Image (cartoon, rainbow, N blue to C red):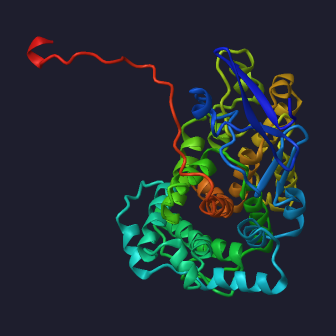
Amino acid sequence: MEPDKATLSYDGQDYALPVVTGSDGKPALDLTDLRRKTGLLAFDPSLMNTAVTRSEITWIDSENGKLLYRGYSVEQLVQESSYVEVAYLLTNGELPTPSQYAEYSTTLSKHSLIHEAMRNFFDGFPGTAHPLAILATMVTALSSYYPDTYESHKEQGVDVKARLLAKVRTLAAMAYKKSIGQPIVYPRDELPYCANFLNMMFAIPAEAYTVPADDEKILNQILILYSDHEQNVATSTVRLLGSTRANLFVCINAGISALWGSREASYSLHTIPMLTTMLNNRMSPERFFEKFISGHEPLKSSAFGHRKYKTVDPRARISRELFHAYYRTHAQKRDPLMEIALEVEEFTLGHTYFKELGFYPNLDFYSALIFRLMGIPTNMNNVIRCIGKLAGWLAQWSEQRAETKHRQMRPQQVYSGMMERPFKPVSER
């Protein structure tokens, strides 16, 4: 048998199926013509064994705990780069030259304002509206100002992707201000990307405000860690919709909504609510986690582990270091919640139950703690994560947009319902 072929034996006949190999040396069975050749469909309900695309953007080494953006280690990018530079890398394929970086940064600054009429949209949301819901809706509303196709904008020299990246932080900050009843703070062109966002978050018109340098730095680092992570649910949602050549803003709305679902609905324990429950009920980690360790209840939490990795997620290692360094210099007053967080960290890293399951405190655990130290409320956590993920979504959307060999994605099914039945009038049922 040829090394680039696999043989499928079915119903007394052998079929040769191609094997494609990635740049990491890992093979994949090409099932593009499976149904045409054999009449069979591949059944993979969770898509855990199905590669839906070829991508040059991000690579995860699950066995050794490595994460690369365009070939660069995430550790090095966090230490030496900025979120804007990483966004350029992801969306353009290479790190920018000094002139390219300056031009890109200027573009993000000059286009951070939104149309003044969009402020009226914010007034339509109730005070209880979740900032993530507001953000998703407002991203879609932006499409009204860019009704032409992406290609036509590109021909006119309009970088719609950069404009969305510029404006998303403004929308996020406005959503936050709306939720707490404070006046909107406009973006300032002279401020870098993350400093501009933090200024819109925390400044008020009546007082002077300077963004702390440490806050700007660590926000850059956290956004880099969230920038991309291969084909997760949100990213795949962006690509699925993008395969129809749908409007960019609608595709990003879908990614935001998918993130909301995976973070809010699928897990029972989130970092800050979990720690708050322990604090209010004076529960030690031993007591709180006893029901999970004893097997009385399954532990489903966005705060521990990552099933993509067979070892520790590198982003967890990095965010742990970032948190402890930041905490040492920013724990100005006693915060009982942080003290419990440290107890949970020590308990979970040392307990056999968590070690065997790979349930270590992860990026979401530490970012939630860092955001709290920065004064960012819990309901804004996923909004900020969305800003980080937007760089990757834009890159993934562009890559899907450039796909010409394959048609739009159209998943199949294995039907398990009733077959043809005679219809009876309602009087005879």
Q: Position of residue 251 (x, y in %)?
A: 52, 58
Q: Is residue 104 above or below residue 27?
A: below
- Residue 307 appears in the rendering: no
Residue 326 quadrant: bottom right
- Residue 184 appears in the rendering: yes
Q: Is residue 195 left or right of residue 27?
A: left
Q: Is residue 74 above or below residue 123?
A: above
Residue in front for this viewpoint, 153 or 215: 153
Q: Is residue 250 left or right of residue 291?
A: left
At 43% from the left edge and 55% from the top edge, which residue is drawn? 129
Q: Quadrant of the C terminus?
A: top left
Q: Is residue 122 left or right of residue 354?
A: left
At 81% from the left edge and 38% from the top edge, which residue is drawn? 309
Q: How many marks?
A: 0
Q: Is residue 145 above or below residue 19?
A: below
Q: Position of residue 428 (x, y in %)?
A: 11, 12
Q: Residue furthest left?
A: 427
Q: Is residue 2 above or below residue 175?
A: above
Q: Residue furthest front?
A: 13
At 71% from the left edge and 81% from the top edge, which residue is drawn? 104
Q: Quadrant of the N terminus?
A: top right
Residue in front for this viewpoint, 411 or 254: 411
Residue 160 quadrant: bottom right
Q: Position of residue 417 (x, y in %)?
A: 40, 19
At 79% from the left edge and 74% from the top edge, which residue is drawn? 213
Residue 70 quadrant: bottom right
Residue in front for this viewpoint, 341 or 255: 255
Residue in front for this viewpoint, 96 or 43: 43
Q: Is residue 348 left or right of residue 262?
A: right
Q: Position of residue 289 (x, y in %)?
A: 72, 25
